[in-house]
Image (spheres, rainbow, N blue to C red):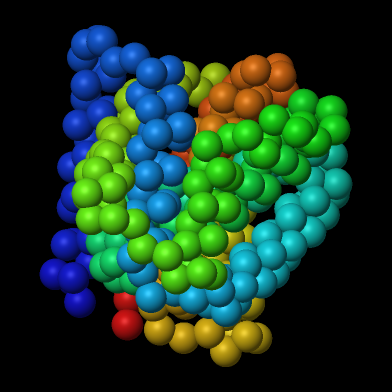
Amino acid sequence: MLVKIWAVMAPVLACAGIGFFWGRSGRPFDMRMVTALVTTVATPCLIVATLGKSDLDLAALARVTGLFLAVLTVTGLVAWLALRLSGRPLRVFLPSMMFPNTGNMGLPLSMLAFGDHGLALGLAWMMLTSVVQFSFGLAVVSGQGLSWKLFRHPILVSVVIAVAMVLFRVRLPEWLFNSVQLIGDLTIPLMLITLGVSLSQLRVRHAGPGAAFSVLRLVLGFAAAWLVCELAGVEGVLRGVILIQSTMPVAVFNYLLAQTYRQGPEEVAAMVVFSTLLSFLTLPLLLAVALP
């Protein structure tokens, strides 16, 4: 079991470590360009390529959607209650509590732990997280309503294409599939390296509430996922992917939004850093529970 856990952790630590030390060395790294490349080109290609060749059908996607909404609802309600009781602002802390790093960390872990099937399920979970974060999460942080720009986002467009391919059993021509898959293969290493660079550049100035809520984010995510899986009778790879994706640290994107709309970026940065460091420490325990 220890060998299996290390086989999953080592590539994640290696790629994130490269990014961290690259950022610390002061070498150039165009964060905007790489982030835009990953979110608008590589990730949509990975979604289409992976779901297009996977054995997931519409019923499986519908089940994942239902489980995702259940976990998100439990997480959101408990986080909302905790923030109300503590008197902390919802616009600062609620999105960070609800939207974990299902891309940079959760997706590689799902693939390394469970192979192509885990990657397909992890992608479905990440897609759902992205859709809700770019809509509800953005509305909470900005204090504005939902934006119709969401429906033009490449990730959402790729979701529609992938679901249509699953629904109608469409397969891409070999030349097109190979091209899309090759571009999609950029996603996971770039995500992990970008995560490392981001961690090297974040500065924590107000660690108090951010550190405390970091612990709650991980505990709450795992507890909500475990409860939903128990009640729904979820087993096997799907259970493992749900536990992994739900117990991930705060996504860096929450910090970018907090900085853009000036909603406690220092506190959110603390949550990102502390939850990520804590997740690396607790990852062996999580994998021991998630792996069959």
Name the quarter where the N terminus is drawn: bottom left
* Residue at image point 46% right, 86% down: 235
Q: Is residue 33 left or right of residue 111?
A: right
Q: Decide which of 4, 124 is in the foreground and name it.
A: 124
x then y, percent, for residue 286: 39, 66
Image location (x, y in percent) of residue 97: 65, 47
Q: Is residue 223 among what the camera can see?
A: no
* Residue 30 position within the rendered picture, expressed as x and y whole percent measured from the top left: 34, 14
> Would you identify the image quadrant in which residue 230 lies?
bottom right
Q: Is residue 222 visible?
A: yes
Image label count: 0
- Closer to the camera, 276 or 12? 12
Q: Is residue 129 left or right of residue 143?
A: left
Residue at far bottom of view: 233
**Height in image: 175 above or below 194?**
below
From this view, report whether residue 216 is shown above or below residue 251: below
How far across and how far down the image is residue 283, in percent?
35, 59
Is 12 on the left or on the right of 219, as rendered? left
**Residue 54 is drawn in which quadrant?**
bottom left
Up-down: is 66 above or below 45? below
Instruction: Report the front residue among 116 and 203.
Output: 116
Q: Residue furthest front?
A: 173
Residue placed at 75% from the left, 43% from the top? 136
Image quadrant in which the C terminus is located: bottom left
Nearest to the observer: residue 88 or residue 287:
287
> Outermost residue toward the left?
3
Report the residue at 54% width, 33% height from top: 253
* Residue at image point 25% right, 29% down: 19
